[in-house]
Amino acid sequence: MQRTEQLSQILAELGIASDYAQTHGLPVFEEAETRVSAGPNIIGREQELEPVTAGKWGAMRQAAQAEGVELLLVSGYRSYAYQASLIRRKIDAGQGLDEILSVNAPPGCSEHHTGRAEAIAPAGEPPLPEAQQSTRAR
């Protein structure tokens, strides 16, 4: 199955209109074809990144460590299917789709699909962008 067909099927299963990205002015990202290990994330789940991004992540992490800040990977590459599973879990927990999509990108619209986006958090701090503004890692 081609990626476009796969993405359309995933969106339909979630109840998201196939033209959601277009009507909401969101970019659509292809899934990375080449990925390398970036090590485990904050909960021990192995993560992958696009090779150049993985190298930059390693350098950033070392530079932070030299400043006494330990950075942890929260999330790296996400497939369309994994992004859909995040949304399904929230639907199953009773959240409405509009509420979910105000926080989570629909499958196809997350830069995490490219393997060039990563969510990070300083060790011992919550992995939320708002919380990070008051840490040494900002």
Image (tube, rainbow, N blue to C red):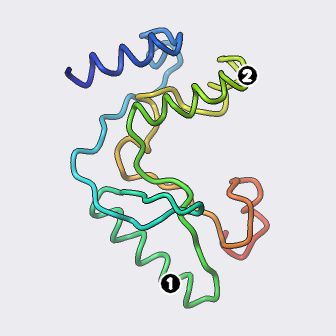
Q: Do the residues labelled 1 and 2 touch (CB within 8 Å)?
A: no
Q: Where residue 31 sits in the image (x, y, percent)? A: 31, 38
Residue drawn at the location 52% of the way across and 15% of the way down: 14
> Three-letter amino acid code at disc 2?
Gln
Residue toward you, 109 or 16: 16
Q: What is the crowding at mark 2: few (fewer than 14 residues within 10 Å), some, or many (at least 20)?
A: few
- All told, the count of numbered labels is 2
Report the disc number at residue 63: 1
Q: Where residue 94 sits in the image (x, y, percent)? A: 74, 21
Report the disc number at residue 118: none
Q: Quadrant of residue 138?
A: bottom right
Q: In the figure, is residue 131 to the left or right of 137?
A: right
Real-space CA distance between mark 1 and mark 2, rounded to the nearest whole angstrom = 39 Å
Residue drawn at the location 48% of the way across and 9% of the way down: 17
Q: Is residue 35 above or below residue 13?
A: below
Report the disc number at residue 95: 2
